[in-house]
């Protein structure tokens, strides 16, 4: 893949220990302040659907519980792949709030690296 840019994000689930929510927030954080009006010029066929989006998530726990399809839904265009790797951070929130879905006091912090680019050989 020819990478055009890489963005970094962080997402947190403060209460409820929902690792997918932290992953979605990290992915959104990585792309939320971007506009790529010139990207089509680089894409095969100038087609936004030929954009490749590779998402790598550093997840501290419950990696097997990440809903990959929900993370993919953050990205409105392109062909999206998601890879979950060990990373991120667990820390204490200092309080357990059962009404917020807490099972314990853990805060899930996830890091995201989002690569955007294209495959030079893709058809026009």
Image (spheres, rainbow, N blue to C red):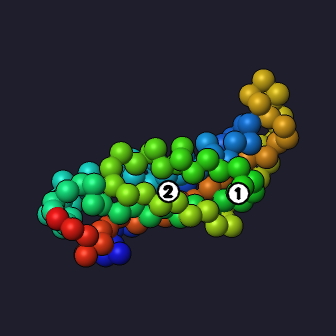
Which of pointers 1 and 2 indicates the residue nearer the eye? 1
The residue at 25%/76% (across/down) is 121
Question: In the picture, residue 18 is in which quadrant?
Answer: top right
The residue at 21%/60% (across/down) is 39
Residue located farthest toward the front when viewing the structure as drawn: 123
- Per the image, the residue denoted by label 2 is 9
Does residue 12 appear anywhere in the picture? no
In front of the other: 1 or 111? 1
Does residue 42 appear anywhere in the picture? yes
Residue at disc 1, secondary structure: helix
Question: In the picture, residue 118 is in which quadrant?
Answer: bottom left
In front of the other: 78 or 113? 78
Q: Is residue 72 above or below residue 114?
A: above
- Per the image, the residue denoted by label 1 is 63
Q: Position of residue 46 (x, y in %)?
A: 15, 60
Determine whether, in the image, residue 110 is placed left or right of residue 100.
left
Q: Is residue 84 above or below residue 1?
A: above
């Amino acid at each position: 893949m020819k990478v055009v840019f890489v963005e970094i994000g962080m997402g947190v689930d403060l209460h409820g220990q929902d690792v997918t929510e932290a992953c979605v927030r990290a992915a959104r954080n990585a792309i939320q302040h971007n506009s790529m009006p010139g990207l089509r010029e680089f894409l095969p066929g100038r087609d936004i659907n030929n954009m490749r989006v590779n998402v790598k998530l550093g997840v501290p726990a419950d990696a097997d519980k990440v809903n990959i399809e929900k993370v993919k839904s953050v990205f409105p265009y392109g062909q999206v792949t998601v890879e979950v790797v060990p990373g991120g951070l667990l820390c204490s929130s200092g309080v357990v709030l059962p009404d917020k879905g807490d099972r314990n006091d853990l805060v899930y912090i996830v890091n995201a690296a989002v690569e955007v680019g294209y495959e030079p050989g893709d058809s026009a």
